[in-house]
Amino acid sequence: MTPKIFDLTGKVALITGASSGLGRHFSKTLSEAGATIILSARRVDNLMELQNELKGNSHVFSLDVTSNESVENLFKEIKKEFGSADILINNAGVNDTRKFKDLDEESWNFVLETNLNGAFRVAKSFTDLLLAQKKPGSVINIASILGLRVGLNLTSYAAAKAGLVQLTKSMALELARSGIRVNAIAPGYILTEINDDFFKTEEGQSYIKSIPMNRLGLESELDGLLLLLASDASSFMTGSIIPVDGGHLVNPL
Ligand code: NAD
């Protein structure tokens, strides 16, 4: 049972990119804490499967964060069904592991369009609705330790996540007096279906040794922070960018 301070009963939480990986896990965690969940992503069939696994109330909506029209349609539905939502988990994201010399404008734009512009688009519509109704809310942007440091072959991803870190702080500053809190989780390497194969390889195993805790994180190890930021337990927190990374960011130089 969720401790009372983290209880989300009566709250509506929108999760983008809920069809796999962390978004799927976050949906389960927030549902178990009592929130009504709005599952959104492009792969609606995956969302319907997830909906069957959730014990609490949930709703499925198709969403492509790279499309203004798709975001507008989602918020029209949210307004119609719920009036507004209380919590946004801005999670949809893509990766590109090309070397800088091999990047082209198309691949750069693809990552920036999803990870930064898409996150902006959803956060803007979410907060516009709250501002119009004078309601409080909590935005949790899923950034990355790559928004704070760089790594090889991750230029567009690191640039987009750094932009998301600054978007988080700017929104926090301007929306604080309206009762809308904006924070970011900066995960290190968390084991998901997507990276499972890589981390089983020799290269992956040797990379893990560079993490001070000498292991990958588990999805469940983001739960404490997720519930803290989503609930009133963090009522005096805004503009915080919090790493969960097994000490990766404090690697010795
Ligand atoms: P994932 O690929 O399983 O999840 C990404 C989700 O975003 C998928 O459901 C995908 O369908 C969705 N998505 C992609 N483009 C979209 C679009 N245009 N519209 C709507 N949905 C879209 O990977 P993940 O590891 O679960 O990543 C989730 C978030 O966590 C991402 O923002 C990622 O950058 C971030 N992150 C992950 C890790 C990690 O180690 N797994 C570490 C740091 C940050």
Image (cartoon, rainbow, N blue to C red):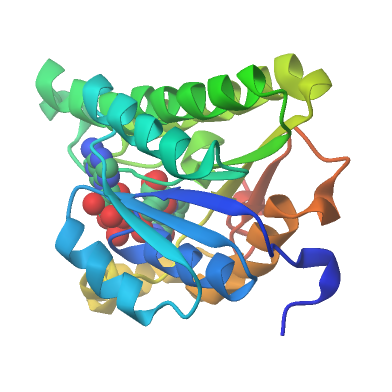
* Residue 217 visible: no
Position of residue 17 relative to residue 182, above or below, is below
Residue that appears at 11% across and 28% down: 102
- Count of picture labels: 0
Q: Nearer the viewer, residue 20 or 30?
A: 30
Residue that appears at 20% across and 66% down: 46
Check the image and name the residue furthest to the front.
Answer: 80
Q: Nearer the viewer, residue 90 or 158?
A: 90
- Tell whether 197 sits left or right of 20: left
User: From the image, which quarter does the N terminus lie in?
Assistant: bottom right
Position of residue 240 relative to residue 199, above or below, is above
- Tell whether 187 sits left or right of 45: right
Task: List x then y, in percent, for residue 122.
Answer: 42, 30
Q: Nearer the viewer, residue 73 or 47?
A: 73
- Tell whether 41 sits left or right of 58: left
Residue that appears at 40% across and 42% down: 151
Task: List x then y, in percent, for residue 225.
Answer: 69, 60
Position of residue 14 relative to residue 169, above or below, is below
Q: Quadrant of residue 141?
A: top right
Task: List x then y, in percent, for residue 121.
Answer: 40, 23
Check the image and name the residue furthest to the right.
Answer: 236
* Residue 180 visible: yes
User: From the image, which quarter does the C terminus lie in?
Assistant: top right
Task: List x then y, in percent, for residue 217.
Answer: 51, 71
- Tell whether 108 sits left or right of 234: left
